[in-house]
Image (spheres, grey):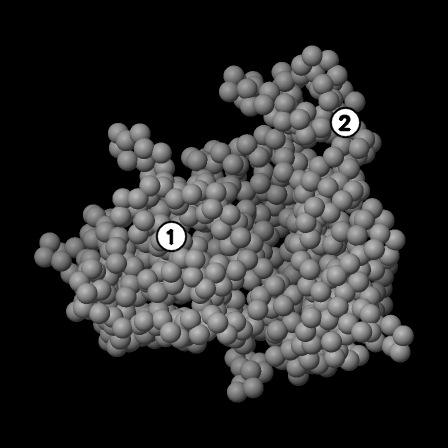
Amino acid sequence: MIKITQLCEQRITSKTSKVTMGTKNNSKHSKSFSLKAEVSNVFRKNPKKPLNYKQVGKAIGLGDANSRDQIVKILQDFKAKKEIEEVQPGKFRLIAKGSAAEGIIDVNTKGQGYVTIEGYDQDVFIPEESMNQSLNGDRVKIKMYALKGGKRLKGEVTSIVERRQMEFVGIMDISDRFAFFVPDSKKIHVDFFVPLKKLNGAKKGDKVIVTLTDWPKDATSPFGEIKEVLGRPGDLDVEMHSILSQYGFPNKFPDDVEKAAAELPIEITEAEIALRKDYRKVTTFTIDPIDAKDFDDAISIQTLKNGNLEIGVHIADVSHYVKEGGIIDKEAVERATSIYLVDRVVPMLPEVLSNNVCSLRPNEEKLTYACIFELNDKGMVQKSWIGRTVIYSDRRYHYDEVQEILEGKGGDFKEELLQLNGLAKIIRKKRMKDGAIGFDKVEVRFNLDEANKPIGVRLKVQKDAHKLIEEFMLLANRTVAETIGRPKKGGNEMPKTFVYRIHDEPNPDKLSEFVGFIKRFGYQFKATKVGEIAQSMNKLLAEVKGKGEQNVIENLAIRTMSKAVYSTDNIGHYGLSFPYYSHFTSPIRRYPDVMAHRLLERYEKGLKSADQSKYEHLCEHSSNMEQKATNAERDSTKYFQVLFMQDGVGKDFKGVVSGVTEWGLYIEIIENKCEGMIKLKEIRNDYYYFDEANFRVIGQNSGKIINLGDELTIKVVRADLMRKQLDFILVDDQFSD
């Protein structure tokens, strides 16, 4: 079993969901995928029975003509892929043995794999002995078998289609005769053999980057050579570079990219200003975190003669400086995103652009791409305009300064900030009423000393100042997407290619698991009608606030939701309840925003629709790199948590049970949100076993129970930087009866 906050990622047997979800406009991906999964599930539950399209439709409760047509197409598709066979005209049966498929393999710490295949509602289990030299993330071909009863799919890897990565980070182990490389990632289940002549200066114990060079057919270990020696483990720079390298991010720009950025013409000419709307005399300011160095967005505000407010969302005009296909652009494409580690930012663009030329710094003229709104006092948009502007930021605010003004303190542009806040609250209220889900997770931030060592923890809580900016950025992103994507009245024109930020409906099986889980805490969750999921989710999030189980349920709720990704095929954004949504407001740190700017300019000039396949490829790449950046940032946070808690070894803390597994309890320390584990075998005076059905542990002799959300007193006994792990023991018996 795995940590309970990852419950929704478990590979468990799928059951027919009892949760009926509402249908959303434009969610054709979701419907198609779900129907394929349900058809596949019918055959696996009846592995020896021939079935026709009517029987399949009846089994999943669909009998209308459109659904029957879809089922017929799916059956033919499965037949072509050799997943089912036509045993009689119009009757099909699962190919029980040797059915071939292709997908991405996810490897656990035991060296076992799970292959995700489109059209299947459960992953295919690959035993360790059937991995056939595949590594985590590889695209593989497999043979799969329906086990007895059709309740689980098992398979073996037959070939590797594409390696996910060829470079790995880890520690060198060197002797007189041979050397082995031990990967940092627990998902890479083998060590690498490195010939002594390919050590590239590495010494025993060094942290290095190794390149996979070969894996002979009969060898138990792959062969590699050292690409780069990062340094000694424990050094902060070495550890952060290791995290970046593990996910394929460079820690510096190539010299020719830096040179090209330094040589860019940056003068703002009168000729360029003449091509833009001039907002230099309109009140404009930025609001960002206190430690921000790049300022993507600014807000302008002025009162119009009719009494309405004109609000401008002005965004750094990166595409004016970074030309498509140029050397800087190619590097930005590869990176796709900036990475925000605890102690540093690894930018998508060279610093001369990200922190200087493009950054909307105060008291400087800047070129921007803007979305301008006229809003009445009810927060309704009367009209909008999208185009290029030139601005002069009058003030740089950080969130705490704005929050103090909103709470009554005096300050520059107080009236303007109060007006913006009033409108933002109206817009947010309407958005929530329309079905948006309000996740307001508390984020942990570290206070660092001059050497970047953590000396304290602060909790980032979403306040009005944050929500003010959020609402106007959401409004701009939505308006941009609607402008391109929404069909014109009476028009027959095909939609133009654009970059959307899409978010699918929750997977019914995950939602069913989630509903079953929260019922153990006494919470109800309705999801039988259109719009009920979002409504129920918001009600639940409000109910758990301040309770011991809050963090567990919030984490599970987030994991129950689908992941937002970039795509040229719009299905809307479920979590925001927007039928059209894009990313337009952060081109300094997100490449999809640069693409959106370029496409807006293209269509403003009246040019034909852009090549969808080209932009879809860039969307997929950007989504993948975004996920890698998220993982790198998470690893960075784990490392700093352990580093921060080194001074806490031997001390007692109050904590909350945040996860329960068969081997231990995950505990989150209340005062600083750092998380560690109590191993069950290290709980004294009794033997505790895992009650999987109820996500708790029980003392075999005493009958004492430890539940999720229970508050316990723990002692920190180890802070292991190598494993990025904190180990705790119980101080006393604070259990539920």
In the displayed structure, does residue 565 sit left or right of residue 124? left
The residue closer to the viewer here, 177 or 234, is 177
Q: Secondary structure at mark 2?
A: loop
Amino acid beneath label 2: Ile
Percent position (x, y) of residue 463?
40, 65
Q: Which residue is mark 1?
A: 596
User: Quick one: label 1, few (<14), some, or many (20+) residues within 10 Å?
Assistant: many
- Element class at badge 1: helix
Q: Position of residue 446 (x, y in %)?
A: 54, 76
Is residue 209 or residue 574 the one in the foreground?
209
Of labels 2 and 1, earlier in sequence is: 2
Q: Depth check: give the residue in front, 708 or 373.
A: 373
Residue positioned most to the left: 305
Q: Which residue is mark 2?
A: 95
Decide: is 670 above or below 549.
below
Q: Is residue 138 left or right of residue 307?
A: right
Q: Does residue 192 appear in this view?
A: yes
Residue at image position (81%, 49%) is 132
Q: Nearer the viewer, mark 2 or mark 1?
A: 1
Q: Which mark is residue 166?
A: none
The answer to which quarter of the image holds residue 5 is bottom right
Establish if 187 lies above or below 644.
above
Quarter assignment of residue 402: bottom left
